[in-house]
Amino acid sequence: MDHPHQPSHPIRVAAREIDHALKTVADVNPSFMTTPDKAAALRELAVLEARVSELRLRVAADACDVAEEHGARDVGAWTAHAVRRRRADCARELRLALALADRPVLAAAVREGAVNLDQAHVIADALAALPGDVDAEVVDRAEVALVGYAADFDPTDLHRLGKRILDVVAPEIAEAVEARHLADLEASARQRMRLGLRACGDGTTRISGLIPDASAARLATYLHAFTNPRRDADPSVVEERAPKAGEPPHHRTPYGRQAAAAFCQLLEAVDPDRLPLHGGDATTLVVTMTLDSLRSEIGTATLGNPGPGDSHDRITAGEARRLACTANLVPAVLGGKSEILDLGRSQRLYNRSQRRAMGLRDRECRAEGCHVPAPWCEAHHLTPWSRGGRTDLDDGVLLCSRHHHHVHDVGYEVEQLAGGGVRFHRRV
């Protein structure tokens, strides 16, 4: 067996010579290089790095005996321990090493420095993703094509090209193969989709899940409609930041918070008449509050339908009154002894014809100085339902989401203007 300090195998000799060459420039300061020399050195070292990496992976692909000798699961796990690297990175490189062993064109391109390691990962993944019933000859043509593209495209572009490579190398079967592949993905998505809601106990609920791509695309489209930058921002999601020196004051709202607000608005905009019935009318929420809470500016209500497993969440009476304008929400008003004094009816909501008439009349948000167009507004009772408001055009007005929140915010006073608009004053 060779002594570790006296290598005789050509690969170890090459490693020693590379190491020796690098040591000769270990103390060289690149600051004194010319700009063209720096650019050339960066390219040359990148090619050298790819060649060294290919050599290391070539050894790794044939080093299962090393793992067996040390009792490791595989050579990737052994490497992670031996050279103190992350296991995930070593496992990923081992997969590439095994792929290169079966892909001579790709391996040669990496060895010659024509394909870097990042590109090699993408190409190998793209070839592995091809359906198993694709002919080996087609896969070989795909390999040659992707290796050729590596001269002009980075890993991101190569990934996109790899997903459509059959359109290039085998257009006669590409559509049928893709159709079968998509059908498999959709069937798998239906089996794996999950959705969970967990109350955090701090006034928020965490939503986590996995849904099919088509449904996610539809949800994203709906959320984009609510997060249109031309819309007035929801005041509950505006984040103020102190301006830097010389910088004008402004508001910045993180997109994640905008999307969350949009999701909440989407839920309120859902037409309950198009949802399935369950036990009569499960799409209607019941809000229970006392008569005093209903009439006062500070009060609470309980949101939730009574029944096994149903949640009962506390909200402010102001929020309940706001939801009553837009949601299919039934208030159950209780007296002093908890007897039901009034059970509101969802017919108090403005119907589609009334909303259309309001849009023609108001054209935009009726808050003073606001110009959000009517399609992005919500119908509001000028005289609140809790005070005998009626669901007719004379008692309705269009308000954007921002000003609709203001109406039900106890921090604002609302003044009705002669022309049918409204003006807001912050309470002192």
Image (cartoon, rainbow, N blue to C red):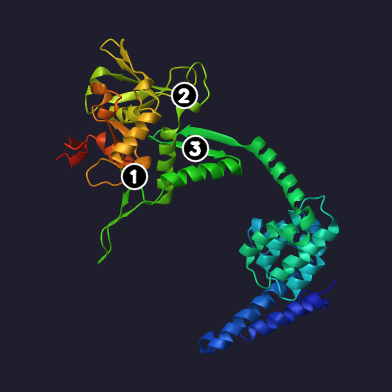
Q: Which residue is mark 1?
A: 373
Q: Earlier in the sequence, mark 3 or mark 1?
A: 3
Report x, y in % for residue 284: 43, 22
> Type of residue at label 3?
Ile
Q: Which mark is residue 207?
A: 3
**From where the camera sits, is residue 108 visible?**
yes
**How far across and how far down the image is residue 294, in percent?**
26, 22
The residue beneath circle 2 is 283
* Front position among marks 3 and 2: 2
Which comes before the other along the chain, label 3 or label 2? 3
First in residue order: circle 1 vs circle 2: 2
Between the C-alphas of marks 1 and 2, the distance is 29 Å
Q: Residues within 10 Å of mark 2 (few under 14, many from 20)?
A: many
> Marks 3 and 2, how far apart in space?
19 Å
The three-letter code of the residue at mark 1 reads Pro
Q: Is residue 111 above or below residue 70?
A: below
Amino acid tagged 2: Thr
